[in-house]
Image (cartoon, rainbow, N blue to C red):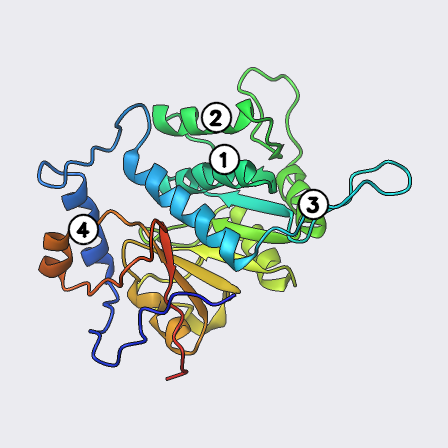
């Protein structure tokens, strides 16, 4: 399937890759008085909703769901290509993007499981998790209930994650975003090691988990995803990945022209009504 190529014109300006401060400044402006996107609007963060939708839409192009199959000879439903996805969510807003994407992927027809071991009590994130629970999406090894009198085994969450990783078709990485400062804490530390060792395709959102937002995958310590979905604008830390020909999409169709010009983003055009665009370089630099 052919894809829209925003780099087709040789005269097109170069897409900018953001430093950590630039990414923070853009977020602050979007959520300020001029940007008019509040952090909590209509009971959800509007930016998070738009970001999660763009992630789900990009994923549906990167790893398209196979056609429906007839029941097998025993009357059992047959699994579709790329059907099973494990959405890994961190404790912050990056995890919130993952919860939104999980909901949309479910509506797109994917069989979604969610790894969300460190929940937050922020009203927005509680609501996003509840929306997924209302769709009966399975949560893999959730944290123990505060009122539970049965302590969870220390390795219970990571063992549950490993079982889910074995049976999934692919992984959506929404663990850590551009504000992450390591090292990762349990159970994410071991999960990142497992993701480096898996042969399952991983799609990362904005910055692969564990990578430095400006320096990238320092010393190759963490996994390299099969595909990356940058949000708003790409970050400095993924520039080498993109310029080496890594599959690269851009989501977050909410930047006004004035902000694009102010920060010199040189954002590509989005085709039609698409919320994400393939910006994979056509040549390796």
Which label sits in the foreground, 1 or 4? Answer: 1
Q: What's the CA distance linking mark 2 and mark 3?
A: 26 Å
Q: Which residue is mark 2?
A: 131
Marks 4/2 in contact by CB < 8 Å: the verdict is: no
Determine whether the residue tagged by mark 3 lies in a helix, strand or loop. loop
In this orientation, which residue lies closer to the viewer: 254 or 156? 254
> How many tags in the picture?
4
Determine whether the residue tagged by mark 4 lies in a helix, strand or loop. helix
Quadrant of the snapshot with the C terminus: bottom left
Q: In this rendering, is residue 284 above or below 119?
A: below
In this orientation, which residue lies closer to the viewer: 8 or 136? 8
Q: Earlier in the sequence, mark 2 or mark 1?
A: 1
Q: Which residue is mark 4?
A: 26
Q: Which residue is mark 1?
A: 103
Residue under the point 11% across and 60% down: 261
Q: Earlier in the sequence, mark 3 or mark 1?
A: 3
Q: In this rendering, is residue 147 above or below 229?
A: above
Residue 171 x, y percent position in the rendering: 57, 52
Which label sits in the foreground, 2 or 3? Answer: 3
Residue 68, numbered label: 3
Marks 2/1 in contact by CB < 8 Å: the verdict is: yes
Residue 238 x, y percent position in the rendering: 36, 67
Residue 37 x, y percent position in the rendering: 20, 36
Determine whether the residue tagged by mark 2 lies in a helix, strand or loop. helix
Q: What's the CA distance linking mark 4 and mark 3?
A: 42 Å
């Amino acid at each position: 399937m052919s894809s829209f190529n925003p780099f087709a014109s040789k005269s097109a300006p170069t897409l900018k890759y953001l430093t950590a401060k630039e990414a923070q400044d853009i977020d602050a402006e979007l959520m300020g008085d001029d940007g008019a996107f509040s952090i909590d609007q209509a009971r959800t963060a509007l930016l998070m909703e738009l970001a999660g939708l763009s992630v789900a839409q990009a994923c549906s192009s990167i790893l398209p769901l196979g056609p429906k199959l007839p029941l097998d000879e025993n009357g059992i439903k047959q699994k579709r290509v790329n059907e099973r996805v494990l959405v890994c969510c961190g404790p912050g807003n990056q995890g919130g993007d993952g919860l939104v994407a999980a909901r949309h992927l479910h509506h797109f027809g994917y069989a979604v499981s969610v790894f969300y071991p460190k929940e937050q009590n922020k009203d927005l994130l509680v609501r996003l998790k509840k929306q997924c629970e209302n769709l009966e999406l399975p949560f893999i090894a959730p944290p123990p209930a505060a009122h539970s009198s049965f302590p969870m085994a220390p390795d219970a969450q990571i063992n549950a994650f490993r079982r889910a990783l074995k049976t999934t078709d692919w992984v959506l990485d929404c663990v850590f975003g551009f504000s992450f400062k390591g090292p990762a804490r349990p159970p994410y530390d071991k999960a990142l090691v497992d993701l480096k060792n898996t042969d399952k395709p991983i799609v990362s959102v904005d910055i692969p988990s564990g990578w430095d937002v400006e320096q990238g995958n320092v010393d190759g310590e963490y996994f390299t995803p099969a595909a990356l979905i940058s949000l708003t604008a790409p970050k400095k830390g993924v520039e080498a990945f993109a310029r080496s020909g890594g599959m690269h999409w851009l989501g977050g169709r909410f930047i006004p022209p004035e902000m694009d010009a102010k920060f010199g983003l040189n954002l590509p055009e989005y085709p039609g009504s698409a919320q994400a665009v393939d910006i994979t370089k056509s040549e390796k630099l």
